[in-house]
Image (spheres, rainbow, N blue to C red):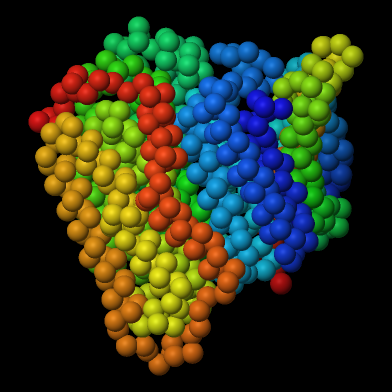
Amino acid sequence: MGNHISLLLVVIPLIAAPIVAVLPRGRLPWLATLIITFICAVLASSQLWMVLNDGVISYELGGWAPPWGIEYRIDAVNALVALIVAAIAAITLPYALLSAEKEIPQQQIPLFYSAFLLCLTGLLGITQTGDLFNVFVFLEISSLSSYALISLGRNRQALTSAYQYLIMGTIGATFFLIGVGLIYSQTGTLNMQDLAKLLPELAHLKTVHTGFAFIMIGIALKLAMYPLHLWLPNAYTYAPSVVTVFLAATATKVAIYIMLRVLFTIFPNDFLLATPTYDIFILSGMAAIIIASIYAIYQSNIKKLLAYSSVAQIGYIALGIGFASSKGITAALVHLFNHALMKAALFMAVGAIIYRIGSCNMKNINGLGKQMPWTFGAIVIAGLSLIGIPGTAGFISKWYLVTAALEQQAWISVAVILFGSLLAVIYIGKLIEALYFKPVTDSNQSVQEAPLLLLVPLWVLVCANIYFGLDTSLTVGVAEKAADVLGVINTSSISGVMNK
Amino acid sequence: MKRNPILRIVAKFLIPLIILFALYVQFHGDFGPGGGFQAGVIFSAALILYALVFGLDAAEKIIPPHILRILASAGVVLYASVGVVSLFLGANYLDYSVLGSTQIKGQHLGILLVELGVGMTVTAVMLIIFFAFAGRGRP
């Protein structure tokens, strides 16, 4: 049984998705999806536990031995990311019932849950597989279903933003595929472990460099790394609330995971040091933190504000990767986990507001904090976590990031991280000001607190934000292990321009 | 187009042949070029030709949209559950060798079933896409 867990995580939602699509309308599709996501969450946590205790899991699909067959290879890194994806899905689903009924046409509901399960299949598949081409296949499964999910939004803009994401996402996937093809033409293998063995000798080839560049751009588009983030704000803004919660917390995180794999497992260190990769990460990260945060301040749509903040937060993770030290990667992974928690909580809270007033414009939410105290409380705590106040999860990731920066004496980066937190204070402050300190508008006088079914998952995430701010043994412990697995290089060998 | 006798007769003559060729590509896929995807596209081309010549309503009478939806789902489930059967037989997922009495028979049966699933889903999805576009603007 043991090893089969790695496979069941992908196959269970895959089989469930077409079945859910033909279930009758009503609440049955939701119930089925709920059960499946809970099973996946349990499997993902037992998988992480197994990896931490017994080491790497390797699974040969169809009984074909790697490197010829497809291998699922699970170590601490993917086990952690798989757990994030599965757990967020399980927390989102109870919330989905009412929110989806309100925002999605009734006849689309079974298809919505089906697409949700397919998206989950794709995201979990990316984390499980040890085969570079298989990554592309699952990337397409998750992307295609997320285009469909985004286009279900209430406004017609949802269609254009889904289309925009489709174009950008397809370019990203194509670039990734071209890159994989070029690498394959030189090495003759797609297995990640095999590639890691073969590439050091071929690292001087122009084809390998070109393939690497294609792969990097492809993934950077998928993870919305600044300045390739243009699809993200609209997609997150106009998607149904549930979809935003799920995608914001998982889709970009999984793309970051592929990035880490490609950088640290597949390509040799000397190769990376001969290219300006790390400097680009640091520059892009710093630009994202400052520019996207400033954009966030000027948004009048709350979801768009949070979406731009997501771009900025991805910048922190890029910065962590750019340091290319064990501490930097730990910080990136911890922030990956923590950012999933805080953004999911914030988008859930905004979803609760939309559930009550049908809008998420700054103008329409004035004074709602008094009428919806629990939702407001959640926004405050998750917002503080986003800023990085001690006692919340956000503080832990910022702390590790600053430590990693100080270790390399990258003073500019330290300043940018702190400045980014100040900008977060402004945009979260703006939100809180509108919700609490502005007088209630007449149309909002009768607005009540969100239903319990929305509040419970929201507060589970809020409590997780506080819990992981106080007890870091799971997050930092696993992240450090994962950084070890990725075999990150000795910091002294880095000679980036930005680090001096 | 319903009154055009040449089109109607040629279509009636061609459609069975197209379907036959689709089935050949489907079930001969493990010996020659072909397989579920190609067969599915050819099969749906036969039905799309029927819809073009005899009208959308006539085509929907032959294969109603809700059946298509079930067919599309059933194909994926068939593919995935072949893998689950090999799990229950004690092998790894999608390991066809354990499905038959010998390894070759098992591999043969496995790929046949999997391709059948692909064929079903591709046929159904092609037709769903066609009906969705062709049916736009209908009351």
User: Which residue: 83% across, 49% down?
Assistant: B8
Image quarter for residue A299?
Answer: bottom left
- Percent coordinates x, y for residue A253 in the rendering: 43, 43
Q: Quadrant of the N terminus of chain A?
A: top right
Q: Horizontal and vertical percent for residue A300?
A: 31, 71
| Residue toward you, A49 or A4 | A49
Q: Is residue A271 left or right of residue A499?
A: right
Quick check: A435 above or below A73? below
The answer to whether residue B21 shows anywhere in this view is: no
Rendering coords of residue B51 (x, y %): 77, 52
Q: Quadrant of residue A176?
A: top left
Foreground pick, A422 / B102: A422
The image quadrant that residue A173 belongs to is top left
Q: Is residue A353 above or below residue A62?
A: below
Quadrant position of the C terminus of chain A in the picture = top left
Q: Residue at x 81, y 28 (%)?
A: B88
Q: In this rendering, would A404 be left or right of A246?
A: left
Between A44 and A129, the one lying in front of the other is A44
The residue at 40%/82% (across/down) is A370
